């Protein structure tokens, strides 16, 4: 049995868009090139044919992967939390959390992260997976809570300053 694939509505839309791009644009274009290259005769030394078949396999593999991710996707919409109701100050999937490190060389440094699905992780934008150690430590905590997280340099205590659902 496959583990649930929690995902934000925006992440779900991005995966669907990529899948439709592959199915409706990329794959048909590559099929045309392969068909044209195959009609040229000898396929053993036909670079367009060989590369096209390889690219077609890559596209098909990605389509299967995306279909499987969407099949098990559980879209988590935090619309009720956005309006300030239903535990808007508590951290759940989809929350954007601002926290401050309380000790060590990073003391006082504020960091903002968003807890997203495993298919949406982008550390440059501060998007961390809901299965990451920091997300697991933050889930169900509230503004003002202090929690311990495991860092590469050892455990650190952080204080939650703000929780938003965008």
Image: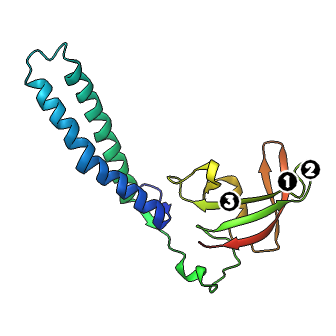
Residue 156, numbered circle: 1
Q: Return the x and y of residue 30 as percentages of the image width and height.
A: 22, 36
Residue 85 to residue 48: above or below: below
Image side of residue 10 versus residue 19, left or right: right
Dividing the picture into quadrants, the one containing residue 113 is bottom right
Q: CA distance from mark 1 to mark 3?
A: 16 Å
User: Which residue is located at x 47 percent, y 64 percent?
Assistant: 10
Dividing the picture into quadrants, the one containing residue 32 is top left
Name the residue nearer the viewer: 160 or 109: 109
Within 10 Å of the Cα at label 2, are there few (<14), some (14-19), or many (20+) other Cα atoms?
A: few
Q: Return the x and y of residue 129 as percentages of the image width and height.
A: 60, 55
Q: Return the x and y of residue 74 as percentages of the image width and height.
A: 45, 66
Kindly state the secondary structure of the residue where label 2 is placed.
loop
Q: Quadrant of the N terminus?
A: bottom left
Q: Which residue corresponds to mark 3?
A: 113
Kindly state the secondary structure of the residue where label 1 is placed.
strand
Q: CA distance from mark 1 to mark 2?
A: 8 Å
Within 10 Å of the Cα at label 3, are there few (<14), some (14-19), or many (20+) other Cα atoms?
A: many
Residue 98, numbered circle: none
Kindly state the secondary structure of the residue where label 3 is placed.
strand
Q: Quadrant of the C terminus?
A: bottom right
Residue 76 to residue 115: above or below: below
Q: CA distance from mark 2 to mark 3?
A: 20 Å
Q: Which residue corresponds to mark 2?
A: 104
Image side of residue 2 versus residue 162, left or right: left
Comes first in the chain, label 1 or label 2? 2
User: Which residue is located at x 14 percent, y 25 percent?
Assistant: 37
Confirm or deny contact between disc 1 and disc 2 (CB under 8 A): yes
Q: Return the x and y of residue 100 as percentages of the image width and height.
A: 83, 61
Between disc 1 and disc 3, the foreground one is: 3
User: Which residue is located at x 62 percent, y 87 percent?
Assistant: 85
């Amino acid at each position: 049995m496959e583990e649930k694939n929690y995902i934000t509505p925006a992440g779900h839309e991005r995966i669907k868009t990529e899948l439709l791009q592959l199915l409706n644009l990329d794959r048909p274009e590559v099929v045309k090139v392969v068909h044209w290259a195959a009609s040229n005769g000898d396929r053993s030394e036909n670079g367009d044919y060989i590369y096209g078949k390889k690219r077609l396999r890559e596209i098909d593999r990605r389509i299967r992967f995306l279909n499987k991710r969407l099949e098990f996707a559980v879209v988590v919409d935090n619309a009720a939390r956005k309006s300030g109701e239903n535990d808007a100050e508590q951290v759940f999937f989809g929350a954007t959390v601002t926290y401050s490190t309380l000790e060590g060389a990073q003391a006082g440094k504020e960091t903002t992260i968003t807890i997203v699905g495993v298919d949406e992780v982008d550390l440059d934008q501060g998007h961390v997976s809901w299965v990451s150690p920091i997300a697991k430590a933050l889930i169900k905590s509230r503004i003002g809570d202090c929690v311990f997280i495991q860092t590469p340099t050892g455990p650190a205590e952080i204080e939650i300053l703000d929780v938003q659902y965008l």
